[in-house]
């Protein structure tokens, strides 16, 4: 088995996972900020956080599979 962190598939998958983790953190921070007015925000943070978190979970499972952990059938 080649050096895992040097393969392009691992680098791209880890980059996607890192972007998703920072995206969920940023959206959580944006959602918890106090409001200045009672107008709704233009960015729906909860559905976006759910979608980005799901993609991050898929990337995490793919990273585990690349490392040799058996996660499926």
Image: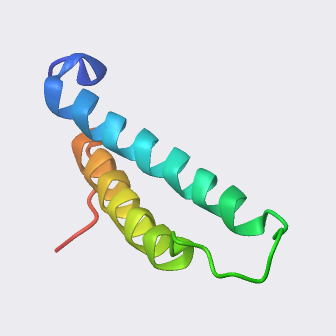
Give coordinates of residue 48: x percent, y percent.
44, 70
Foreground of the two, 29 or 71? 29
Give coordinates of residue 27: x percent, y percent.
59, 60
Rendered view: 27 above or below 18: below
Q: Is residue 41 left or right of residue 29?
A: left
Question: Residue, x 26% and y 40% (percent of image)?
Answer: 13
Give coordinates of residue 62: x percent, y percent.
26, 52
Question: Residue, x 81% and y 70% (percent of image)?
Answer: 35
Rendered view: 30 above or below 21: below
Q: Quadrant of the N terminus?
A: top left
Give coordinates of residue 39: x percent, y percent.
69, 81
Q: Is residue 58 left or right of residue 41?
A: left
State the count of labels.
Answer: 0
Q: Is residue 72 left or right of residue 14?
A: left
Colour scheme employed for the rendering of this structure:
rainbow
Question: Residue, x 32% and y 58% (percent of image)?
Answer: 61
- Examine the rendering and report whether any part of residue 6 can be seen: yes
Question: Residue, x 43% and y 51% (percent of image)?
Answer: 20
- Examine the rendering and report whether any part of residue 69 can be seen: no
Q: Quadrant of the C terminus?
A: bottom left
Foreground of the two, 35 or 52? 35
Foreground of the two, 5 or 33? 33
Q: Is residue 30 left or right of residue 21?
A: right
């Amino acid at each position: 088995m080649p050096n895992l962190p040097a393969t392009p598939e691992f680098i791209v998958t880890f980059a996607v996972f890192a972007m998703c983790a920072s995206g969920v953190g940023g959206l959580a921070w944006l959602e918890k900020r106090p409001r200045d007015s009672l107008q709704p925000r233009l960015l729906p943070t909860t559905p976006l956080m759910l979608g980005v978190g799901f993609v991050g979970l898929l990337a995490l499972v793919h990273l585990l599979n690349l490392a040799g952990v058996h996660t499926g059938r």
